[in-house]
Amino acid sequence: MFALFFIMEIIKSSDNKFVKKLNKLKQKKYRDEYAEFFVEGLKNVTDSIAARPDTLVTLVFSEKNIALREKFANFDTVVLTDALFEKICEAESSQGVISVHKIPESVFPKRNVVLLDRVRDPGNVGTILRTALAAGYDVVVNGCADIYSPKVVRSAMSAVLKCRIGVNVDIGTLKAGGYSIFCADMGGKNVFEREKPRGKYCIVIGNEAEGITPDILRDCDEALSIPQSGDIESLNAAVAAGIMMYALNR
């Protein structure tokens, strides 16, 4: 349980040590250094705290939304002037609240898993995290957009704290852990013609432009594709991941 601790002073200076740190958390090198990230928006903040209260460091409110502190009476809080708060926020509608969290430790998956192989678009990464949570999958990320960047966190919403996420877990380790590996590839077998796999499995989603790393594609148990009737080169990575997840789990 966090101690009741209200800071009545409103921070007004951009030279304030806490404000400087909060701004730094927009950059990956500082997120790595401090092992912290932030969440914007009332619903995202509320859901994130409910999911992982143990990760919460502090809550930050804008001056005009100071009344929101009543919803979070048992947590440490900081208040900034509206001008300072707006400079920190990247979301168009932050609703006057930010939560700062410790980055959870990387964990090995327990359930069926989606492995993201160099997926670089933050929106795709965030959407896949949300879909994986909804479909009942754990997630592994290798060489992807930083999952704790503001753009990914906004797209994923509270899924960044609700999902079981592993970082840089390779295919060999997953195979040793009993996982069958299925790669999403246009040259593979129609995913809708495949029976639901027996045992644990991993779906690999590749880079938006280059696809799956050749070594992973070579070592996978099976390549699977999504049939397309139109004249289109490929599906969006997040869309393809969602279809694969539900098709194999049907």
Image (spheres, helix red, strand yellow):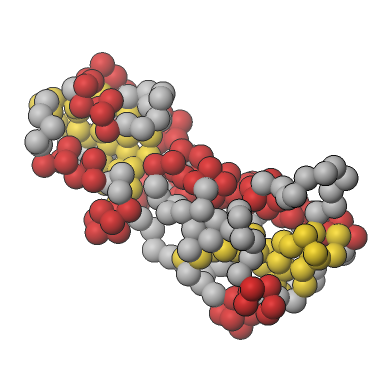
Question: Could you tell me which residue is drawn at 16 percent across and 41 percent down?
Answer: 20
Comparing 66 with 33, the one in front is 33
Q: Residue furthest right?
A: 193
Give the image quarter of residue 49: top left
Total numbered circles: 0
Work out whether residue 137 or residue 75 is closer to the camera in this orientation and state it: 137
Residue in the foreground of this view, choosing between 85 and 237: 237
Could you say where residue 160 lies in the image, as x and y percent from the top left?
47, 49
Quarter of the rendering occupied by the C terminus: bottom right
* Image location of residue 192, percent across then percent down: 87, 56
Q: Up-down: is 231 above or below 197?
A: above
Say whether residue 9 is visible. Answer: yes
Residue 112 seen by the camera: no
Residue at point 49% right, 58% down? Answer: 144
Q: Is residue 241 above or below residue 183?
A: above
Quadrant of residue 77 in the image?
top left
**Percent from the top left, x then y, of residue 61?**
26, 28
